Image (tube, grey):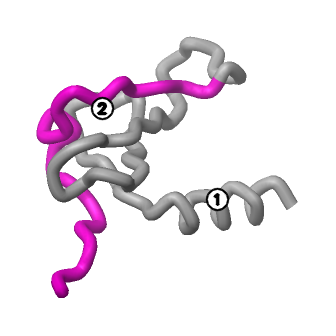
Amino acid sequence: MSALPRHVPSSNDLHDVRWLRSSYSTGANNCVETARPSGGPWAGLLAVRDSKDPAGPALLFSPGSWAGFTTAFRS
């Protein structure tokens, strides 16, 4: 069994995804965006990218890892 990918070199490699920003974003392009790829090796993972570099890399997280991060961040 191979390890899950941890990132993609370019967010453009994630086809047919809808990138979302937090409703708390001010529109100043200084936040992160998330997407849920539905196909390929990234299916079921959460992609996160920098809104200032939409064609740049995206980090990939399992749903459980992302939930743990956001829970710890809120604490």
Q: Which residue range is magenta in the image?
A: 1-22
Contact flag, marks 1 and 2 (Cβ < 8 Å): no
* Number of marks in the rendered image: 2
Depth check, front residue: 16 or 59:
16
* Helix, strand or loop: magenta stretch: loop
- Residue located 66% across and 66% down the image: 68
* Separation of residues labelled 1 and 2 (CA atoms): 24 Å
Residue 14: in magenta span? yes
Q: Secondary structure at mark 1?
A: helix
- Residue located 20% across and 32% down the image: 55
Q: Is residue 27 left or right of residue 8?
A: right
Quadrant (top left/top right/bottom left/bottom right) for the C terminus: bottom right
Q: Which residue lies under the disc numbered 2?
A: 53
Q: Secondary structure at mark 2?
A: loop
Three-letter code, disc 2: Asp
Is residue 61 placed above or below 39 in the rendered structure? below
